[in-house]
Image: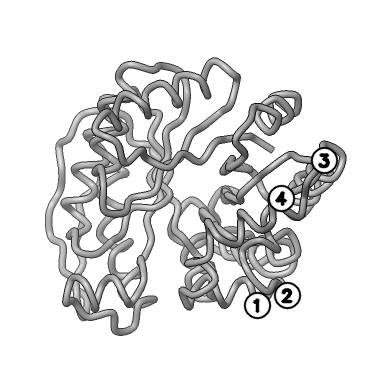
Amino acid sequence: MRFGLFLNESQKPDALGRLRERIARGADDGFSSVWMSHTFGLDTLTALAVIGSQVPGIELGTGVVPTYPRHPAALAQQALTVNAVLDGRLALGIGLSHQIVIEGMYGMSFDRPARHMREYLSILMPLVRGENAAFEGETLTGRLGLNTPGPRDMPVLIAALAPRMLKLAGEVADGTVLWMTGARTVAEHVAPAVTEAARAAGRPAPRIVCALPVCVTDDAEAARALAAERFEIYGQLPSYRAVLDREGAEGPADVAIIGDEDEVGARIEALAKAGVTDFVAAEYSPDTRTRDFLKSLL
């Protein structure tokens, strides 16, 4: 199992500089990857291109870029350009986002999201592999090719929790990137579904990238309270609420990896046994104890 870091962007004016420092530190500490989400601050792909050109040797992943409102050809062209800048170190994670964002903020339809993702991948995947897209669906059409330079083996992962999305992750994409998903759900639901879909399609074993909050501490009660406060929104969004319910978790604090070194190590080992290929730590402790322990696992 590879180890990565999940980095939230700074809200301060020197956000790019702070991200560069954190990514450089992650690379120096020996982590295999760093991942950033795409919300309402920096454009993640642009930021990773700028920062990654200055920090060599570490995989840079998006966790995740929403498919809406970008046409898949536009996203393919941008991602291929970023991957060329990074000398082939980009892992493109994409996702549907949430109805409250797509309909409530963008004013776009969120009807039949699994259909949307299948049609999206039907255009995106050929283009990022250097092939022409020739697809006409119910909501998306793509009839074009791209001549963007650079490597054509960029992994494309989708945020997948529901059965139809997990099938797409293995059958069409290169795996899945997860958030707020516990070891039991990975072992019983995610890993079997995505692996079988890849096998049935004759595709390579998929990546299962699992990101979770982590805090190594002797005061687990305080750390859980902080996790409950900081990650509260994920217990309210329907897609994450569903996966928390599947895990039997009341809220995000119940899937956060919290405890002393022995307990945190055992929880991470359980993820490896469940089928996780890449564990991505979202550190939220104020001291260096969590990072020091994670480095000891590399």
Q: Which residue is mark 1?
A: 245
Density class for disc 3 (Cα within 10 Å; few <14, some 14-19, many ≥20) is: some
Q: Which residue is mark 4?
A: 257
Q: Amino acid at mark 4?
A: Ile
Dot 2: element:
loop
Q: Earlier in the sequence, mark 1 or mark 4?
A: 1
Q: Which residue is mark 3?
A: 260
CA gap between label 1 and label 3 equals: 26 Å
Q: Is residue 193 above or below residue 203?
A: below
CA gap between label 2 and label 4 equals: 15 Å
Quarter assignment of residue 193: bottom right
CA gap between label 2 and label 3 equals: 23 Å
Density class for disc 1 (Cα within 10 Å; few <14, some 14-19, many ≥20) is: few
Task: Find residue 138 and report its horizontal and vertical position in percent.
Answer: 21, 81
Q: Amino acid at mark 3?
A: Asp
Give the camera-side residue of 163 and 8.
8
